[in-house]
Image: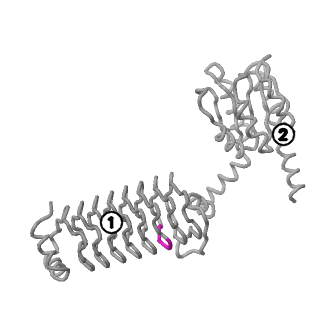
Protein backbone atom coordinates (compact mmCIF):
# COMPACT_ATOMS: atom_id res chain seq x y z
CA UNK A 1 0.00 0.00 0.00
CA UNK A 2 0.96 3.67 -0.29
CA UNK A 3 3.42 5.25 2.12
CA UNK A 4 1.17 7.19 4.49
CA UNK A 5 3.69 10.03 4.90
CA UNK A 6 3.97 10.46 1.14
CA UNK A 7 0.20 10.33 0.72
CA UNK A 8 -0.26 12.92 3.46
CA UNK A 9 2.20 15.27 1.76
CA UNK A 10 0.36 14.94 -1.54
CA UNK A 11 -2.95 15.78 0.10
CA UNK A 12 -1.46 19.15 1.12
CA UNK A 13 -1.61 20.16 -2.54
CA UNK A 14 0.61 20.21 -5.62
CA UNK A 15 2.67 23.24 -4.50
CA UNK A 16 3.62 21.65 -1.18
CA UNK A 17 4.25 18.30 -2.88
CA UNK A 18 6.55 19.79 -5.52
CA UNK A 19 8.49 21.76 -2.89
CA UNK A 20 9.06 18.54 -0.95
CA UNK A 21 10.23 16.79 -4.14
CA UNK A 22 12.77 19.57 -4.76
CA UNK A 23 14.14 19.28 -1.24
CA UNK A 24 14.13 15.46 -1.08
CA UNK A 25 15.31 14.55 -4.56
CA UNK A 26 16.75 11.23 -3.39
CA UNK A 27 13.36 9.90 -2.22
CA UNK A 28 11.21 7.91 -4.64
CA UNK A 29 7.59 8.43 -3.60
CA UNK A 30 5.59 5.30 -2.91
CA UNK A 31 1.94 5.85 -3.80
CA UNK A 32 1.17 2.24 -4.68
CA UNK A 33 -2.59 1.67 -4.89
CA UNK A 34 -3.30 5.18 -3.56
CA UNK A 35 -6.87 6.40 -3.98
CA UNK A 36 -6.56 9.66 -5.90
CA UNK A 37 -9.82 9.52 -7.81
CA UNK A 38 -10.85 12.91 -9.19
CA UNK A 39 -7.95 14.77 -7.53
CA UNK A 40 -6.46 17.79 -9.32
CA UNK A 41 -2.76 16.91 -9.69
CA UNK A 42 -2.00 19.25 -12.58
CA UNK A 43 1.71 20.02 -12.81
CA UNK A 44 2.64 17.57 -10.04
CA UNK A 45 6.14 16.07 -9.99
CA UNK A 46 5.73 12.29 -9.95
CA UNK A 47 9.05 11.58 -11.64
CA UNK A 48 10.23 8.03 -10.76
CA UNK A 49 7.32 7.62 -8.32
CA UNK A 50 5.46 4.36 -7.78
CA UNK A 51 1.80 4.81 -8.68
CA UNK A 52 1.25 1.20 -9.62
CA UNK A 53 -2.35 0.10 -9.13
CA UNK A 54 -3.38 3.61 -8.04
CA UNK A 55 -6.91 4.87 -8.59
CA UNK A 56 -6.48 7.99 -10.71
CA UNK A 57 -9.79 7.81 -12.53
CA UNK A 58 -11.10 11.27 -13.47
CA UNK A 59 -7.96 12.84 -11.95
CA UNK A 60 -6.31 15.82 -13.63
CA UNK A 61 -2.65 15.28 -14.49
CA UNK A 62 -2.26 18.06 -17.04
CA UNK A 63 1.40 19.04 -17.42
CA UNK A 64 2.33 16.53 -14.70
CA UNK A 65 5.87 15.11 -14.71
CA UNK A 66 5.44 11.34 -14.99
CA UNK A 67 8.84 10.57 -16.50
CA UNK A 68 10.00 7.13 -15.43
CA UNK A 69 6.91 6.73 -13.25
CA UNK A 70 5.46 3.30 -12.54
CA UNK A 71 1.74 3.27 -13.37
CA UNK A 72 1.32 -0.44 -14.06
CA UNK A 73 -2.30 -1.55 -13.63
CA UNK A 74 -3.30 1.96 -12.57
CA UNK A 75 -6.89 3.07 -13.08
CA UNK A 76 -6.77 6.19 -15.26
CA UNK A 77 -10.24 6.00 -16.76
CA UNK A 78 -11.35 9.45 -17.86
CA UNK A 79 -8.19 11.04 -16.46
CA UNK A 80 -6.82 14.22 -18.02
CA UNK A 81 -3.17 13.75 -18.98
CA UNK A 82 -3.11 16.37 -21.72
CA UNK A 83 0.45 17.61 -22.29
CA UNK A 84 1.73 15.46 -19.43
CA UNK A 85 5.40 14.41 -19.55
CA UNK A 86 5.46 10.63 -19.26
CA UNK A 87 8.70 9.78 -21.07
CA UNK A 88 9.86 6.29 -20.14
CA UNK A 89 6.91 5.63 -17.84
CA UNK A 90 5.49 2.13 -17.37
CA UNK A 91 1.75 1.90 -17.97
CA UNK A 92 1.57 -1.83 -18.66
CA UNK A 93 -1.96 -3.14 -18.22
CA UNK A 94 -3.17 0.28 -17.08
CA UNK A 95 -6.78 1.28 -17.73
CA UNK A 96 -6.81 4.49 -19.77
CA UNK A 97 -10.28 4.20 -21.22
CA UNK A 98 -11.57 7.60 -22.40
CA UNK A 99 -8.48 9.31 -20.97
CA UNK A 100 -7.31 12.63 -22.43
CA UNK A 101 -3.71 12.28 -23.63
CA UNK A 102 -3.78 15.06 -26.20
CA UNK A 103 -0.21 16.20 -27.02
CA UNK A 104 1.12 14.11 -24.13
CA UNK A 105 4.83 13.24 -24.17
CA UNK A 106 4.79 9.43 -24.16
CA UNK A 107 8.12 8.62 -25.81
CA UNK A 108 9.46 5.25 -24.73
CA UNK A 109 6.39 4.52 -22.62
CA UNK A 110 5.44 0.89 -21.97
CA UNK A 111 1.74 0.43 -22.71
CA UNK A 112 1.80 -3.34 -23.12
CA UNK A 113 -1.66 -4.78 -22.57
CA UNK A 114 -3.09 -1.37 -21.64
CA UNK A 115 -6.69 -0.43 -22.38
CA UNK A 116 -6.90 2.84 -24.30
CA UNK A 117 -10.43 2.35 -25.58
CA UNK A 118 -11.85 5.71 -26.63
CA UNK A 119 -8.73 7.57 -25.47
CA UNK A 120 -7.75 10.90 -27.03
CA UNK A 121 -4.13 10.82 -28.20
CA UNK A 122 -4.27 13.55 -30.83
CA UNK A 123 -0.78 14.94 -31.43
CA UNK A 124 0.74 12.72 -28.74
CA UNK A 125 4.43 11.82 -28.90
CA UNK A 126 4.58 8.01 -28.85
CA UNK A 127 8.08 7.61 -30.26
CA UNK A 128 9.55 4.20 -29.36
CA UNK A 129 6.46 3.42 -27.26
CA UNK A 130 5.51 -0.22 -26.74
CA UNK A 131 1.84 -0.70 -27.60
CA UNK A 132 2.01 -4.47 -27.95
CA UNK A 133 -1.28 -6.20 -27.17
CA UNK A 134 -2.86 -2.90 -26.13
CA UNK A 135 -6.47 -2.07 -26.99
CA UNK A 136 -6.94 1.22 -28.85
CA UNK A 137 -10.47 0.59 -30.08
CA UNK A 138 -12.15 3.89 -31.00
CA UNK A 139 -9.10 5.86 -29.85
CA UNK A 140 -8.05 9.05 -31.67
CA UNK A 141 -4.35 9.06 -32.59
CA UNK A 142 -4.63 11.56 -35.42
CA UNK A 143 -1.39 13.53 -35.92
CA UNK A 144 0.36 11.42 -33.26
CA UNK A 145 4.05 10.57 -33.67
CA UNK A 146 4.50 6.78 -33.66
CA UNK A 147 8.10 6.83 -34.87
CA UNK A 148 9.76 3.55 -33.88
CA UNK A 149 6.72 2.37 -31.93
CA UNK A 150 6.04 -1.32 -31.38
CA UNK A 151 2.56 -2.45 -32.40
CA UNK A 152 2.39 -6.22 -32.09
CA UNK A 153 -1.06 -7.82 -31.77
CA UNK A 154 -2.43 -4.33 -31.13
CA UNK A 155 -6.18 -3.76 -31.43
CA UNK A 156 -6.76 -0.69 -33.61
CA UNK A 157 -10.37 -1.37 -34.50
CA UNK A 158 -12.10 1.87 -35.55
CA UNK A 159 -9.06 3.83 -34.40
CA UNK A 160 -8.34 7.19 -36.01
CA UNK A 161 -4.75 7.08 -37.31
CA UNK A 162 -5.06 9.89 -39.83
CA UNK A 163 -1.86 11.87 -40.44
CA UNK A 164 0.19 9.84 -37.94
CA UNK A 165 3.94 9.63 -38.43
CA UNK A 166 4.74 5.92 -38.59
CA UNK A 167 8.40 6.06 -39.58
CA UNK A 168 10.31 3.02 -38.31
CA UNK A 169 7.34 1.27 -36.70
CA UNK A 170 7.22 -2.45 -36.00
CA UNK A 171 3.67 -3.50 -36.89
CA UNK A 172 2.60 -7.14 -36.84
CA UNK A 173 -0.70 -9.00 -36.51
CA UNK A 174 -2.85 -5.90 -36.06
CA UNK A 175 -6.62 -5.58 -35.94
CA UNK A 176 -7.34 -2.62 -38.21
CA UNK A 177 -11.01 -3.27 -38.86
CA UNK A 178 -12.69 0.05 -39.57
CA UNK A 179 -9.56 2.07 -38.75
CA UNK A 180 -8.97 5.43 -40.46
CA UNK A 181 -5.52 5.22 -42.05
CA UNK A 182 -5.23 8.10 -44.49
CA UNK A 183 -2.08 10.21 -44.88
CA UNK A 184 0.23 8.04 -42.78
CA UNK A 185 3.69 9.63 -42.93
CA UNK A 186 6.36 6.96 -43.47
CA UNK A 187 9.39 9.27 -43.53
CA UNK A 188 11.37 10.99 -40.79
CA UNK A 189 10.98 14.76 -40.21
CA UNK A 190 14.24 15.54 -42.05
CA UNK A 191 13.14 13.72 -45.22
CA UNK A 192 10.71 14.63 -47.95
CA UNK A 193 7.23 13.67 -46.80
CA UNK A 194 5.83 10.44 -48.24
CA UNK A 195 2.40 9.21 -47.18
CA UNK A 196 0.52 5.93 -47.54
CA UNK A 197 -2.95 4.81 -46.51
CA UNK A 198 -2.22 1.41 -44.96
CA UNK A 199 -0.37 0.95 -41.69
CA UNK A 200 0.56 -2.68 -42.27
CA UNK A 201 2.34 -1.93 -45.55
CA UNK A 202 3.90 1.34 -44.40
CA UNK A 203 7.08 -0.24 -43.06
CA UNK A 204 7.51 -2.32 -46.22
CA UNK A 205 7.07 0.67 -48.53
CA UNK A 206 9.68 2.64 -46.62
CA UNK A 207 12.17 -0.24 -46.79
CA UNK A 208 11.47 -0.63 -50.48
CA UNK A 209 12.24 3.04 -51.08
CA UNK A 210 15.34 3.27 -48.91
CA UNK A 211 17.04 -0.11 -48.91
CA UNK A 212 18.84 -1.22 -52.05
CA UNK A 213 19.08 -4.77 -50.76
CA UNK A 214 15.31 -4.96 -50.35
CA UNK A 215 14.82 -3.69 -53.89
CA UNK A 216 17.31 -6.28 -55.06
CA UNK A 217 15.29 -8.97 -53.32
CA UNK A 218 12.12 -7.78 -55.07
CA UNK A 219 13.90 -7.93 -58.41
CA UNK A 220 15.11 -11.41 -57.54
CA UNK A 221 11.62 -12.53 -56.62
CA UNK A 222 10.30 -11.65 -60.06
CA UNK A 223 13.22 -12.88 -62.16
CA UNK A 224 14.91 -15.75 -60.29
CA UNK A 225 12.30 -17.61 -58.23
CA UNK A 226 11.19 -21.04 -59.41
CA UNK A 227 8.34 -22.72 -57.53
CA UNK A 228 8.56 -26.52 -57.24
CA UNK A 229 5.31 -28.34 -56.44
CA UNK A 230 4.88 -32.02 -55.70
CA UNK A 231 4.49 -34.75 -53.13
CA UNK A 232 7.99 -35.86 -52.31
CA UNK A 233 7.90 -38.80 -49.92
CA UNK A 234 11.13 -40.04 -48.41
CA UNK A 235 11.94 -42.40 -51.27
CA UNK A 236 11.63 -39.52 -53.77
CA UNK A 237 13.65 -36.89 -51.90
CA UNK A 238 16.58 -37.47 -54.25
CA UNK A 239 14.43 -36.22 -57.16
CA UNK A 240 13.59 -33.07 -55.26
CA UNK A 241 17.18 -32.42 -54.21
CA UNK A 242 18.42 -32.91 -57.78
CA UNK A 243 15.95 -30.38 -59.19
CA UNK A 244 16.76 -27.80 -56.53
CA UNK A 245 20.52 -28.22 -56.86
CA UNK A 246 20.45 -27.92 -60.64
CA UNK A 247 18.32 -24.79 -60.46
CA UNK A 248 20.64 -23.20 -57.90
CA UNK A 249 24.02 -24.20 -59.25
CA UNK A 250 23.65 -24.44 -62.96
CA UNK A 251 21.04 -21.78 -63.63
CA UNK A 252 21.34 -19.26 -60.77
CA UNK A 253 17.70 -19.59 -59.79
CA UNK A 254 16.16 -19.38 -56.32
CA UNK A 255 14.05 -22.54 -55.88
CA UNK A 256 11.08 -22.48 -53.51
CA UNK A 257 9.73 -25.92 -52.66
CA UNK A 258 6.18 -26.68 -51.62
CA UNK A 259 5.94 -30.33 -50.56
CA UNK A 260 2.41 -31.74 -50.43
CA UNK A 261 3.43 -34.67 -48.25
CA UNK A 262 1.35 -33.29 -45.37
CA UNK A 263 -2.04 -33.86 -43.66
CA UNK A 264 -4.96 -33.79 -46.08
CA UNK A 265 -7.12 -31.61 -43.85
CA UNK A 266 -5.20 -28.43 -44.59
CA UNK A 267 -5.97 -26.01 -47.42
CA UNK A 268 -2.85 -24.31 -48.79
CA UNK A 269 -4.47 -22.79 -51.86
CA UNK A 270 -3.89 -19.17 -50.86
CA UNK A 271 -0.25 -19.87 -50.01
CA UNK A 272 0.34 -21.58 -53.35
CA UNK A 273 -1.30 -18.74 -55.27
CA UNK A 274 0.91 -16.20 -53.48
CA UNK A 275 4.09 -18.16 -54.16
CA UNK A 276 3.15 -18.73 -57.79
CA UNK A 277 2.58 -15.01 -58.32
CA UNK A 278 6.23 -14.39 -57.38
CA UNK A 279 7.73 -17.10 -59.59
CA UNK A 280 9.26 -16.87 -63.04
CA UNK A 281 7.98 -20.38 -63.73
CA UNK A 282 6.62 -23.43 -61.91
CA UNK A 283 7.82 -27.04 -62.01
CA UNK A 284 4.96 -29.36 -60.98
CA UNK A 285 5.71 -33.04 -60.35
CA UNK A 286 2.46 -34.95 -60.94
CA UNK A 287 3.87 -38.41 -60.22
CA UNK A 288 1.59 -38.86 -57.23
CA UNK A 289 -1.90 -38.48 -58.76
CA UNK A 290 -3.32 -37.19 -55.48
CA UNK A 291 -1.01 -34.19 -55.42
CA UNK A 292 -1.71 -30.57 -56.31
CA UNK A 293 -4.75 -30.69 -58.66
CA UNK A 294 -6.75 -28.09 -56.72
CA UNK A 295 -3.79 -25.83 -56.01
CA UNK A 296 -2.45 -26.04 -59.57
CA UNK A 297 -5.80 -25.02 -61.01
CA UNK A 298 -6.07 -22.16 -58.52
CA UNK A 299 -3.22 -20.19 -60.07
CA UNK A 300 -3.13 -21.39 -63.69
CA UNK A 301 -6.45 -19.66 -64.26
CA UNK A 302 -5.33 -16.46 -62.49
CA UNK A 303 -1.76 -15.90 -63.67
CA UNK A 304 0.00 -16.36 -66.97
CA UNK A 305 2.99 -18.17 -65.44
CA UNK A 306 4.78 -21.01 -67.26
CA UNK A 307 4.04 -24.40 -65.69
CA UNK A 308 6.24 -27.36 -66.60
CA UNK A 309 4.59 -30.62 -65.47
CA UNK A 310 6.67 -33.76 -64.77
CA UNK A 311 5.76 -37.42 -64.27
CA UNK A 312 8.08 -40.27 -63.34
CA UNK A 313 7.78 -43.54 -65.26
CA UNK A 314 4.49 -44.68 -66.74
CA UNK A 315 2.23 -43.03 -64.16
CA UNK A 316 -0.75 -41.14 -65.54
CA UNK A 317 -1.68 -37.59 -64.68
CA UNK A 318 -4.87 -37.00 -62.73
CA UNK A 319 -7.97 -36.97 -64.91
CA UNK A 320 -8.74 -33.26 -64.66
CA UNK A 321 -5.24 -32.12 -65.56
CA UNK A 322 -6.08 -31.91 -69.26
CA UNK A 323 -8.42 -29.04 -68.44
CA UNK A 324 -5.38 -26.88 -67.72
CA UNK A 325 -4.08 -27.27 -71.27
CA UNK A 326 -6.51 -24.60 -72.42
CA UNK A 327 -3.93 -22.20 -70.96
CA UNK A 328 -1.01 -21.97 -73.35
CA UNK A 329 1.39 -21.33 -70.46
CA UNK A 330 0.84 -24.90 -69.20
CA UNK A 331 3.43 -26.90 -71.13
CA UNK A 332 3.36 -30.51 -72.27
CA UNK A 333 4.17 -33.11 -69.62
CA UNK A 334 7.79 -34.21 -69.50
CA UNK A 335 8.22 -37.87 -68.53
CA UNK A 336 11.41 -39.19 -66.96
CA UNK A 337 12.36 -42.74 -66.03
CA UNK A 338 14.61 -42.22 -63.05
CA UNK A 339 16.97 -39.75 -61.39
CA UNK A 340 19.70 -40.09 -64.01
CA UNK A 341 17.22 -39.53 -66.81
CA UNK A 342 15.86 -36.45 -65.04
CA UNK A 343 19.31 -34.93 -64.58
CA UNK A 344 20.21 -35.57 -68.21
CA UNK A 345 17.06 -33.89 -69.51
CA UNK A 346 16.53 -31.21 -66.85
CA UNK A 347 18.13 -28.32 -68.71
CA UNK A 348 16.89 -29.11 -72.21
CA UNK A 349 13.45 -30.56 -71.52
CA UNK A 350 12.35 -28.71 -68.40
CA UNK A 351 14.17 -25.46 -67.73
CA UNK A 352 14.67 -24.30 -71.33
CA UNK A 353 11.00 -24.70 -72.39
CA UNK A 354 9.84 -22.89 -69.24
CA UNK A 355 12.28 -20.04 -69.86
CA UNK A 356 11.19 -19.79 -73.48
CA UNK A 357 7.54 -19.59 -72.46
CA UNK A 358 8.37 -16.93 -69.83
CA UNK A 359 10.10 -14.88 -72.54
CA UNK A 360 7.11 -15.35 -74.84
CA UNK A 361 4.67 -14.21 -72.15
CA UNK A 362 6.79 -11.14 -71.44
CA UNK A 363 6.83 -10.26 -75.13
CA UNK A 364 3.06 -10.61 -75.35
CA UNK A 365 2.56 -8.34 -72.33
CA UNK A 366 4.86 -5.72 -73.82
CA UNK A 367 2.94 -5.81 -77.08
CA UNK A 368 -0.34 -5.28 -75.24
CA UNK A 369 0.76 -2.69 -72.69
CA UNK A 370 3.66 -1.13 -74.53
Classed neighbour count for the residue bearing mark 1: other residues with Cα under 10 Å, few (<14), some (14–19), many (≥20): many
Whole-percent x, y for residue 1 in the image: 15, 60
Whole-percent x, y for residue 320 in the image: 80, 27
Are the residues at dot 1 and dot 2 in contact (C-beta closer than 8 Å)?
no
Give the position of the C terminus as an image quadrant.
bottom right
Residue behind mark 2: 329
Residue 242 covered by magenta stretch? no
Q: Nearer the viewer, residue 251 or 55?
A: 55
Report helix, strand or loop for mark 1.
loop
Give the overall secondary structure of the magenta segment. loop
Task: Residue at 67%, 28% (x, y): give it.
Answer: 240
Residue 13 lies left or right of residue 117; in this view the side is left
Residue behind mark 1: 77
Q: Which residues are magenta?
A: 142-146
Residue that lies at the very extreme toward the top in this rendered image: 314
Residue 145 covered by magenta stretch? yes
Tell me how far mark 1 sits from mark 2, CA to CA: 61 Å
* Quadrant position of residue 37: bottom left
Whole-percent x, y for residue 235 in the image: 63, 18
* Quadrant position of residue 47: bottom left
Task: Residue at 10%, 67% (x, y): give it.
Answer: 4
Q: Is residue 189 above or below residue 357?
A: below
* Quadrant position of residue 92: bottom left
Q: Nearer the viewer, residue 251 or 184?
A: 184
Observer-side mark, 1 or 2, equals 1
Q: Nearer the viewer, residue 8 or 222?
A: 8
Residue 199 lies left or right of residue 127; in this view the side is right
Report helix, strand or loop for mark 2.
loop
Amino acid sequence: MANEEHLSLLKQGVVAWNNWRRLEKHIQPDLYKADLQGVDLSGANFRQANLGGANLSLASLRYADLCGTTLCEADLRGANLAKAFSIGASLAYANLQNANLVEAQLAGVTLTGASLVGALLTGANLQEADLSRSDLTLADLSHADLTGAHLVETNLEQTNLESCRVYGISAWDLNLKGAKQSNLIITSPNEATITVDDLEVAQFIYLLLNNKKIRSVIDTMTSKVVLILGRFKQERKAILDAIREELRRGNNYVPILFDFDRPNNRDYTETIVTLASMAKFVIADLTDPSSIPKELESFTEKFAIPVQPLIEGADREYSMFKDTWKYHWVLQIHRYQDLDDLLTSLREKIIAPAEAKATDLLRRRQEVYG
